[in-house]
Amino acid sequence: MAAIEFRGVSRTFPAGRPALEGVDLAVADGERLAVLGPSGSGKSTLLRLAAGLDRPTAGGVWFDGRCMDDVPPHRRDVGLVFQEPTLLPYLTVAGNLEFGMKARGVARDERRRRVAEVAAMLRLDGLLGRRPSELSGGERQRAAIGRSVARRPAVLLLDEPFSSLDLPLRSALRRDLIDLHDRLGMTLIHVTHDQGEALAIGHRVAVLDLGRLVQVGPPREVYNRPATPFVAGFVGDPPMNLIPTDGRLMGIRPEHVRVRPAGETALAATVARVEDRGDSTLITLDLAGARVTARVADPTGLREGGAVALDLDPARACWFDERPTERKASTKLP
Ligand code: ADP
Ligand code: MG
């Protein structure tokens, strides 16, 4: 297996802002790291640098303390999975799973054993004789993952592998991937723009904003203590409220906004919208011109246009400097 280190990694292209700028990131041996960011934030660039498909313009990538600058992709021991499954159309699923091992001269019996093992882990048992064109989208993606792990790479890199699948299928595949990782224990970097997926898959989540790494931490930390207003507004559904106060921004999660009958506390607000989400109700509020969302279990007595009072738990709040150059948050801990 392998520990991966990005040391001061930048990648610039002739035109436009840098795709990555000064990224320092250490991924532990056997860790599952989710890389989260919107489209264009540099996620694929980071993955391509780890795979050796591209070279940094500054800094370097290190595997187990060894600089990878001059190591080509096929000598890095990495498996790659992309958004669109890359399977060989003329081979069966079994043939695809075997392919990488054959190329590396793994003996026939060992190949058979590993194909059976990976097929069982990824629920591909009944599909081994089929060709890619005879598989559904989810089956094809499971086969593509199987293809890259069957030869047991030290590192597995996944670039938005579930993005083209529908929601229930996505969560099923998430589960499969986590189970597979628990069994095989390779170092895994999973790139996604889906915050729910990143929080579900990563031991830690690394957040990219315009090519800069703005936060790395366990899901709970990224969710509860976002390092920047960008992270606060990107993680969570709905995301954290950002309320301007004098010179600073107060961040508070919708589940930490309490809605009370009008007059009980100082913060007077008006209900703008009541939205039933099934498991809870989202209340959009107008607080002196600022929009604030609250998540409540019981919406009784709340109607659109009604006057209410808000309770914002200061122990749960995060504070951010409003100055745009100030990227780091000064979080006030409870
Ligand atoms: P993501 O995967 O997060 O959507 P990318 O890593 O693909 O983002 O791209 C990051 C930035 O780098 C984008 O602004 C993109 O336009 C730019 N970029 C990526 N690859 C190239 C390239 N080969 N040439 C020029 N610009 C590129
Ligand atoms: Mg991408």
Image (tube, grey):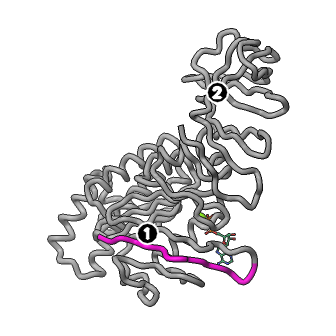
Image spot of residue 80 (x, y percent): 43, 69
Please state which amino acid type lies under the numbered disc 1.
Leu
Q: Give the residue number, with chain letter if any, for mark 1.
A: 80
Q: Name the residue furthest right.
A: 289
Q: Residue 257 got which mark?
A: 2
Choose the circle earlier in sequence order: 1 or 2: 1
Image point (65%, 10%), residue name: 300
Left or right: 308, with 230 as reference point: right
Disc 1, disc 2: CB below 8 Å? no
Residue 10 in magenta? yes
Kindly identify the residue that appears in the image at 48 percent across and 40 percent down: 168
Give the quarter of the image for residue 135: bottom left
Residue 265 position (above or below residue 194): above
Evaluate whether residue 317 shows in this view. Answer: yes
Look at the numbered disc 1 and give the secondary structure of its residue. Answer: strand
Q: How many angstroms separate mark 1 from mark 2 (CA)?
A: 42 Å
Q: Residue furthest top?
A: 301
- Is the residue marked by circle 1 packed among few (<14), some (14-19), or many (20+) residues within 10 Å? many
Quarter of the rendered structure image containing ligand 2: bottom right
Q: Position of residue 150 (x, y in %)?
A: 29, 66
Q: Is residue 136 above or below residue 269?
A: below
Image coords of residue 265 (percent x, y): 72, 17
Say if 56 sits above or below 112 in the image.
below
The quarter of the displayed image where residue 154 is located = bottom left
Q: Residues within 10 Å of mark 2 (few under 14, many from 20)?
A: many
Q: Give the magenta range.
A: 1-15
> SS for tag 2?
strand
Q: Amino acid at mark 2?
A: Val
Residue depicted at x 64% and y 27%: 257
- Name the quadrant containing residue 67: bottom left
The residue closer to the viewer here, 294 or 86, is 294
Q: Is residue 170 visible?
A: no
